[in-house]
Amino acid sequence: MPKAYWIAHVDVRDPERYKDYVATAKPAFERFGARFLARGGAYEAMEGKGRGRNVVIEFPSMQAATDCYHSPDYQAAKAIRQEVADAEMIIVEAYEG
């Protein structure tokens, strides 16, 4: 079964409240086996609009990635994030070719 990834591009409007999002999301990430591959840090926008924060999270499967997103724990965190940040996020299945 291939792994899957959350890929998020985020502009944080309220850094202090964003910490609440991170803390609230943590139990969901732990429960669904998330592993952060990129979490903020330096970046270079090569094409299109760049955002201030870029995140890549690995999950053991597409099912785990989507279940995490739809879990009550993450939905509570998402509500906070939507108040304090603008984001685009996708879930993509890993290529195993």
Image (cartoon, helix red, strand yellow):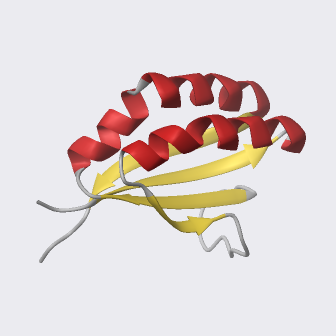
Please name the residue shown 23% across and 53% down the image. Answer: 61
Residue 30 against residue 44 in the figure, above or below: above
As drawn, is 57 to the left or to the right of 92? right
Residue 10 against residue 35 in the figure, above or below: above
Residue 15 against residue 60 in the figure, above or below: above
For the question of whether residue 72 can be seen, the reply is: yes
Image location of residue 54, percent across then percent down = 63, 60
As drawn, is 14 to the left or to the right of 75? right
Q: Nearer the viewer, residue 97 or 28?
A: 28
Please name the residue shown 69% across and 74% down the image. Answer: 43
Please name the residue shown 45% across and 22% down the image. Answer: 72
Q: Nearer the viewer, residue 33 or 92?
A: 33
As drawn, is 45 to the left or to the right of 57? right
Image location of residue 55, percent across then percent down = 57, 59
Q: Nearer the viewer, residue 15 or 71?
A: 71
Q: Quadrant for the C terminus, please.
A: bottom left
Tell me the quarter of the picture where residue 83 sits. top right
Please name the residue shown 69% across and 26% down the image. Answer: 80
